[in-house]
Image: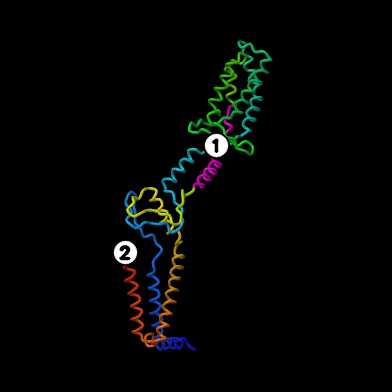
Amino acid sequence: MSLRTKISELLNLLVNRHYKIYKVLLVFCAIFFLAWLFPKDNFKYDFEIDRPWNYEDLIAPYAFPIVKSNEELEIERKNIRINFVEYYRLDTTIQKDNTAKFNNDFKFFFQNISNDTTRNLASQDSTYFLKIGNKLLNDIYSKGIVEVNNNQLNKIKLLQGNRYKELEYNKLHNPITAFKYILDQIEADTKTNDNLLSSFLQNYIQANIFSDDETTAKFLNAALDEILPIRDKVQDGEKIVSNGQLVDESIYRKLISLKNSYSESKDGLSSEFITFMGYFIIVGMLLYLMLTMNNLFSKSNVNNMRTLTFILLILVSFSVIVKSVSNLAE
């Protein structure tokens, strides 16, 4: 069978059955339009803060959370950042390396200062100087040395082994305070009251505590993520606002939260389509029952195109009037 023959048969079928096709399309359009007129689950109120509520008393149709404002969330984030304790790490190799280097270089240092006859240094002084030097290095490194002094920090969390220990930041050394500590200790000791030893020890002062930016960012982001976007909950049936009542900040947040919950419950186009299809099926079933009952008593009403069009037009027109009156009442 040729394509032309198939097309010809299809056109003949449409011509012979155009009456039935028209009736089906007419009923389908009526069902579609009636289903579209069904009320949408939208938030129908307009409101502003510090303005009276111009509608009837609003009762919560269901339980919903009260969402925090952007300002509230930003204040919470700011407080977390201000009070957050930053993470630092201790590099134990710094003390070992610098102490070993000091011990290796000390022999040449003491030989040089011993050549100065004005100092009257004995061989036993070498042992004492070496002992004091190691002790002072151990003191400053045990306390901890940071690279720079940050006056904005109160506390830090220092990784020691597999655990973090909280320390007061202002009790840690920086290279300047570490050197001052050495100067004070050497000046207080009559045997080592010599600027040469303190200047020599300065070469082995190095920061051994460093900011761990990666860990700090990790825990800070985790703390920020724990901020709850809700602050309270409105119970089902709870009065939200009364007619004429001034909309204050608390009521405003409840209304905004209810409006958002309406939008979220619709869940995009998929939810709207499912709702519409439900209305479409219900209207289609009711219209089918009505036309079936009408056909039982008077077949001519349904079979007659003018009568069927008039019946459907009455239904659609009455629905449009009801919808318009309902919108005006709102």
In this view, the residue in front, 105 or 312, is 312
Tell me: residue 5, above or below residue 215: below
Residue 97: x, y in percent? 64, 30
Q: In terms of image quadrants, where is residue 108?
A: top right
Instruction: Say the numbered circle drawn on residue 329.
Output: 2
- State the SS at label 2: helix
The stretch in magenta equals: 205-227
Q: Nearer the viewer, mark 2 or mark 1?
A: 2
> In the rendered image, which quarter contains the C terminus?
bottom left
> Which residue shows up at 32% across the image and 56% down it?
54
Q: Secondary structure at mark 1?
A: strand
Between residue 57 and residue 302, name the one nearer to us.
57
Position of residue 273 relative to residue 29, above or below, is above
Badge 2: few (under 14), some or many (20 or more) residues near its Cα, within 10 Å?
A: few
Q: Position of residue 315 (x, y in %)?
A: 35, 76
Mark closer to the chain start, 2 or 1? 1
Percent from the top left, x then y, of residue 148? 52, 31
Q: Residue at x 39, y 62 (%)?
A: 42
- The image quadrant that residue 29 belongs to is bottom left
Residue visible at 51% across and 32% down in the picture: 154
* Nearest to the observer: residue 3 or residue 187: 187
Residue 281, x across and y down, in percent: 45, 74
- Quick one: label 1, few (<14), some, or many (20+) residues within 10 Å? some
Magenta region includes residue 62: no
Amino acid beneath label 2: Ala
Q: Relative to 299, is 171 on the left or the right?
A: right
Along the horizontal axis of the image, is 216 left or right of 49? Answer: right
Q: Amino acid at mark 1?
A: Ser
Which residue was labeled with disc 1?
Answer: 211
Between the residue at mark 2 and the residue at mark 1, the CA separation in whole angstroms equals 66 Å
